[in-house]
Amino acid sequence: MKLLHEEQTPYANYRIVQRGRRVDMDVQGAVFATFHPDQLLTGYSWDAITAAAALTPYKRVRRLLMLGVAGGTSLRQIRRLWPKAKLVGLDIDRRLIRAANRYMGLQDCQVEMIFGDADQKLKTLEGSFDVIIDDLYKCGHLDVERGGVPFPSRLQNLVPLLAPKGIIAANFINDVGFEQPLDQGQKAFQANFKENACIRSIYGYNQVFVGGKCLRPDFDLKTYGHKWTSPRDKQLWNDLKVEFL
């Protein structure tokens, strides 16, 4: 293990650590992002986020908004799926993003960054976005926790930013102690969208909800298999579990 960078910002105490060829962003003991020069997929929730975005009914994504960028693990995957999409990232920690650009290849994703509190900045954004992803997390006193206002309240500010067939995805922890936000999230999706799905990766304790007026059937995920060049990435993509709710 090699420590590449360590910093305490007003929002996080984080380290950039190289483990073999992999580079991780550790925030107070939790891995918030990971980067590998030859592999895009991870087996963890970042893959499920990308798979959720891939359930968009649009053949080509024009604009995508991501709340909570950190090291940009999912955005590197998403950039592979849609090379010409306009990616907009919203994050509160400018210094952490600067480190991600330097050590984790975030600059190669060509993301238009907006800095500030997400729930405040959402009120100033103009749509329309084909895909919106909520991956807002912070390290609390005891464990990782969702940041900002409760998800059902945030969702009311996200829906008006959608394109006519746009979809919203949100990452939730599925573990002991996180039952309430997980239940609130699922109920909010089912109350607001005609079609919903849940995506799980093979590792970790997360699940990603995605909803919209219409979603692609899960077997369409296989049409993106050619996007991944390494055999490991192809296998991890095929291992994702999609359940329509």
Image: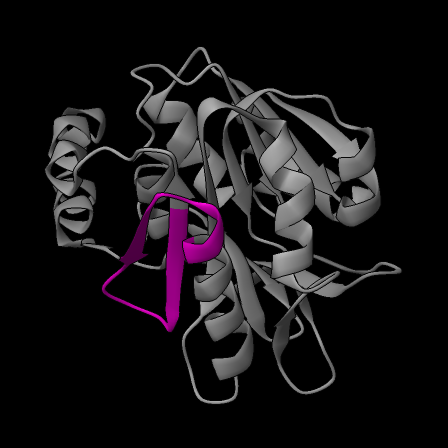
Horizontal and vertical percent position of residue 31: 53, 65
Left or right: where does residue 188 sit relative to residue 145?
left
Relative depth, front residue between 64 and 216: 216
Left or right: where does residue 31 sit relative to residue 13?
left
Horizontal and vertical percent position of residue 11: 82, 61
Q: Quadrant of residue 99?
A: top right
Q: Is residue 109 visible?
A: yes
Q: Seen from this angle, which residue lies furthest right?
A: 10
Relative depth, front residue between 194 and 8: 194
Q: Residue at x 38, y 19 (%)?
A: 82
User: Does 242 appear above or below 205?
Assistant: above
Horizontal and vertical percent position of residue 76: 45, 33
**Chosen colour scheme:** one colour
Q: Residue at x 77, y 64 (%)?
A: 12
Relative depth, front residue between 33 and 114: 114
Relative depth, front residue between 102 and 142: 142
User: Does 50 appear above or below 136?
Assistant: above
Q: Quadrant of the C terminus?
A: bottom left
Q: Residue at x 81, y 36 (%)?
A: 123
Left or right: where does residue 186 sit relative to residue 155?
left
Horizontal and vertical percent position of residue 9: 85, 58
Magenta segment includes 201: yes
Magenta segment includes 85: no
Q: Residue at x 81, y 42 (%)?
A: 94
Total count of labels = 0
Q: Is residue 36 visible?
A: no
User: Does 245 appear above or below 194?
Assistant: below
**What span is colored magenta in the figure?**
190-210
Q: Quadrant of residue 223?
A: top left
Left or right: where does residue 20 sit relative to residue 152?
left
User: Does 93 appear above or below 204?
Assistant: above
